[in-house]
Image (cartoon, helix red, strand yellow):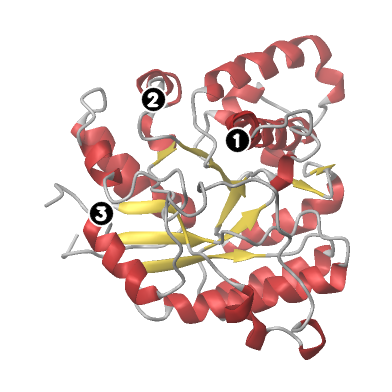
Amino acid sequence: MNAFPIIDADGHVTETLGSLKKYLKEEYRSRPLMTSEAWDRSFSGTLGKRNEDPKVQLADMDLDGIDIQVVFPTHLSLNAERETDVATDIARAYNDWLAAFCAHDPDRLKGVAMVALQDINAAIREVRRATEELGLVGVMMPTNVRDQDIGKREFWPFYEAVEQLGIGLALHGGIRAAERMTGRFDSFISVHSLAFPFECMAAITGLIFAGVPEKFPKLRIAALEACCGWVPFLMDRLDEEFEKRSKEAPLLKRKPSEYMAGENFFYAFELEESTVPYVIERIGPEKLLYSSDYPHWDTSWPNTVKMFQERQDISDEHKRQIAWENPQRFYGFKAVVNGL
């Protein structure tokens, strides 16, 4: 038994085209939509598992000790999609499918919406529909859109809408998002080591120097599945650049590090990441999020909660903040588990 309830701030579901088909417009149902890749992530299925059954998801959560899970996709990645209408329809179809998935137990399964930012107005309409009508609790933000900096002003109306909705903006990098950044490597181990943290670092750099956290002071932003040890480094690096070239970031009224360590930025960490205590010392425990990354090939399921709880370098008080209080503040929902 856990000393306090556990909220997994970043779990996944293994959505398939077969499941999404009935939600897509008819003209898109017979065409290929999920781009295959050359990497054998799971060593031909020997690592992780695939699941898109909510009953299995809940049973696996019980096995690990997870009370509530925030659910992200696995295969879908719309940031590079060239056909705007197709991307927009995939986002709508996925959100409908995910809402039905989470409806099996809405108190425990909390879905995060997908949008296609190739069409900003359509993305705004979709995030409003997904949260206000479907009950999803956040929105997944790619770390780049068609390889473009997400700090650009063209995306600001979307940030304004997310801020008004009071939901979390979840930056979720990945290998597809970092194709140009990691294109020099010919091994998965090299690509996977850098893709996720580097993409989130690039995204946050763009957002901060563009002035997004100053322009939208209530917008909550999280960097997920990207470790956290780089956070102090990036704080110092951006501060140094800002000290010398502040004219290139005219909207900022504070140091970049002050935004990154502020109440509206959150960071997930790896369960065995040795730098977590130092990050807590630098920015506080209220900025960190626990995640299982279930059911991916590199998850430690069904032992993620055990690994987190057994860490001796994080206090029990901080563990409670990280796994119970912080995800509620970031996503903006109120959870009730066993009367707590």
Which residue reaches farthest front? 44
Q: Nearer the viewer, residue 186 or 249?
A: 186
Mark 2: few, some, or many residues within 10 Å (few <14, many ≥20)? many
Question: Do we see residue 258 in this rendering?
Answer: yes
Q: Which residue is identified by label 3?
A: 64
The image shows residue 92 at horizontal and vertical percentages of 68, 76
The earlier-in-sequence mark between 3 and 2 is 3
Measured Cα–Cα span from mark 2 to mark 1: 20 Å
Asked if the residue under mark 3 is in contact with the one under mark 1, i.e. CB atoms within 8 Å, the reply is: no
Q: Is 32 placed left or right of 99 in the picture?
A: right
Q: Is 229 placed left or right of 253 in the picture?
A: left
Discs 1/3, front: 1
Amino acid type, mark 1: His
Q: Which residue is identified by label 1?
A: 192
Q: Residue placed at 58% from the left, 31% from the top?
A: 189
The image shows residue 72 at horizontal and vertical percentages of 52, 60
Q: Which residue is identified by label 2?
A: 276
Asked if the residue under mark 1 is in contact with the one under mark 2, i.e. CB atoms within 8 Å, the reply is: no
Q: Quadrant of residue 19?
A: bottom right
Q: Nearer the viewer, residue 298 or 202?
A: 298
The earlier-in-sequence mark between 2 and 1 is 1
Mark 3: few, some, or many residues within 10 Å (few <14, many ≥20)? some
Q: Residue placed at 42% from the left, 80% from the top?
A: 103
Mark 1: few, some, or many residues within 10 Å (few <14, many ≥20)? some
Discs 2/1, front: 1
